Image (cartoon, rainbow, N blue to C red):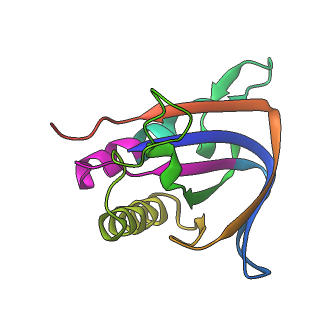
Amino acid sequence: MIALLQRVSEARVMVDGGITGAISTGTLALIGVQRGDSERQAQRLLQRVLAYRIFPDDAGKMNLNLEQAGGSLLLVPQFTLAADTDSGNRPSFTPAAPPAEGERLFHYLVMLAEQALGSVEAGVFGADMKVHLVNDGPVTFWLQVPPAA
């Protein structure tokens, strides 16, 4: 399972002209689900997302995690993160989980995040989404929990 984390001062996701999720200061996490991923990968990825220290402390060093910084979380499904881009000029989506499994695990991740944080914003799996963000820094990190073998 993959998360592309972006530290944002604001972010929102829109579907059909309506906002499905919006945050101010926090983390926008684009989520890709790979073949072989399970609840175990979702649990570990969420642990990493919530613990990852990407927010500045009083000295300006990235020492604070999302909760310590008082930020919010916006989770957005993005199957293209699981693409194979190793060769050619067109991505292969063979490594991505089948849509039903990807959707199930994305919703599981959102549920876990809500349990941990109380409130989480999210995009809509399979929808044509428009993601608007102000990347603060810019700060962007790729986190991956490899699929089960």
Residue 71 in the image: state x and y as whole percent. 69, 50
| Camera-nearest residue between 13 and 47 | 13
Magenta-drawn stretch contains 29:
yes
- Tally of marks: 0
Q: Compared to 56, does 44 lie above or below?
A: below
Residue extending farthest to the left is 149
Which image quadrant: the N terminus?
top left
Residue 13 in the image: state x and y as whole percent. 72, 66
Magenta-drawn stretch contains 110:
no
Residue 45 in the image: state x and y as whole percent. 39, 43
Residues in magenta, as a range = 27-45
Residue displayed at 66% across by 50% down: 28
Q: Give the left or right position of residue 38, taking residue 64 as reference.
A: left
Residue 123 in the image: state x and y as whole percent. 60, 68
Residue 68: tell me if it is visible: no
Residue displayed at 48% across by 54% down: 79
Task: Name which quarter of the figure residue 62 lies in.
Answer: top right
Residue 15: tell me if it is visible: yes
| Camera-nearest residue between 83 and 13 | 83
Which image quadrant: the C terminus?
top left
Q: Give the left or right position of residue 142, taking residue 35 as reference.
A: right
Residue displayed at 67% across by 68% down: 129
